[in-house]
Image: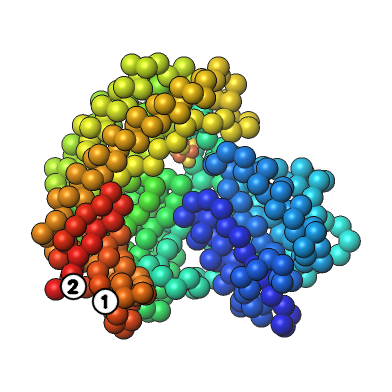
Amino acid sequence: MQNKTFYIKTWGCQMNVYDSDKIKTLLLQHGYSAVEDEKTADVIVLNTCSIRENASEKLFSLLGRIKKTNPNAITIVAGCVAQVESKKITKNTIADIVVGTHMYHKIPQLIAELKEEKLVDIEFKPYEKFDSLPVDQESSTQTGYIAIQEGCNHFCTYCIVPFTRGREYSRPAEDIVAEAKHLISKGKKEIFLLGQNVNCYKTDNDDFADLLYKVAEIPGVERLRYMTSYPSDMTDRAIEAHKNIPNLMPYMHLPAQAGDSDVLKSMNREYTVEEYLEKIDLVYKARPDIAITSDFIVGFPGETEEQFQRTVELVKKVKYASCYSFKYSPRPGTPAEKMEQMPEEIKEKRLAILQATIKEYQQKFNNKFIGKTVHVLVEKVENGQLNGRGEHFQSVFANNEDKSLVGSIVAVKITSAGTNSLTGELV
Ligand code: SF4
């Protein structure tokens, strides 16, 4: 298929960005070229996310717009909303193909097979997907992203992921190592291991800690990172890896979700606050300077003021480097949707209080870097400024015009710190 164009719109998490990158690579390999505007594309791929509120409404309104602006395009809905709402999508929209989270590799084949009938493929076959998707990565970033596992067995009462991504599946370590070597050979400096729950990684021979050691020792892997982890799956060996592996970056995203054990129980999180704090202690012992980050949900059904205050206390105790925080909003089909919901005003008030505390600690964490030298993997140089990530994953800026520095690791002495970034001078 020659001279055909495609456009991809991606919502959601890093896994979706990763999946979209693979779809892009696949379509390029099949002779398509990418365009930046859905109105001019022959094929439109909408890679959806169901984590945020109103995900399907946003999708349906975009599909309505496409019906007017580019009705002849082949429209493909992929991702988490596609996985759980395929019937609604095919019945009510112009979408031609609905493809589930494990079937992206079939997109070129489905396009070729498309005639009058709409096509739907939402089977759960993670091994088939990972065996079939290209290992190349089209995005221009200096980081090579690798999905090491997919799916989740935890069934938090607010979350739809176990239904959209299926049960946990871990890829063989050899395949991950081979993919990492390939990405390094293409010039990537950093490997970022991805998954809904990376630290539950387990095959017959390896667990997550084993995998960290295996990937870290690949020549050319200057930096290794991973996301997201589940607190009670974080083993002592995985924590120790932060002490023992020099190129494993001092950064850990360990979502607590709430600071009260009864709320955690109602969320079906499989740890208490005390157990979470024990993990945090071990992490700080292994790597005292580590940046720990978290996610929090406020206004979960039944959360009392005292319980909410314990979440604020947890932020103060852990001294997070940064956190994502959200008001609870029900996801259709999850157990928490059926619980008694809290008034919106209370959720909003609590979120504002929590975010102010998070911001305060974020600023304190960043202030510690003033006067210090951090090493930055340069992502871009534009408008006289260099930008990239330091070891602790902060965004770092420095005045510079030398575009040849993109892709290299440079030393920057920090002169000022904001809540979201550091600024300094090249040394
Ligand atoms: S651990 Fe909980 S929040 Fe995370 S993906 Fe699994 S079910 Fe969802």
The structure residue drawn at horizontal position 58% and vertical position 48%, both measured from the top left corner, is 49
Within-10-Å neighbours for mark 1: few <14, some 14–19, many 20+: some
Question: For the point 56% across and 53% down, which residue is it?
Answer: 11
Percent x, y of residue 26: 60, 71
Instruction: Say if residue 322 shows up in the picture.
Output: yes
The residue type indicated by label 1 comes to: Asn
Image quarter (top left, top right, bottom left or bottom right) of the N terminus: bottom right
First in sequence, mark 1 or 2: give its number.
Answer: 1
**Residue 224 found in image quarter:** bottom left
Residue type at mark 2 is Leu
Q: Quadrant of the C terminus?
A: bottom left
Between 64 and 174, the one lying in front of the other is 64
Question: Seen from this angle, which residue lies furthest right?
Answer: 116
Whole-angstrom CA distance, mark 1 to mark 2, is: 8 Å
Is label 1 in a helix, a strand or a loop?
loop
Q: Quadrant of residue 126?
A: bottom right
Q: Is residue 247 left or right of residue 329?
A: left
Residue of label 2: 426
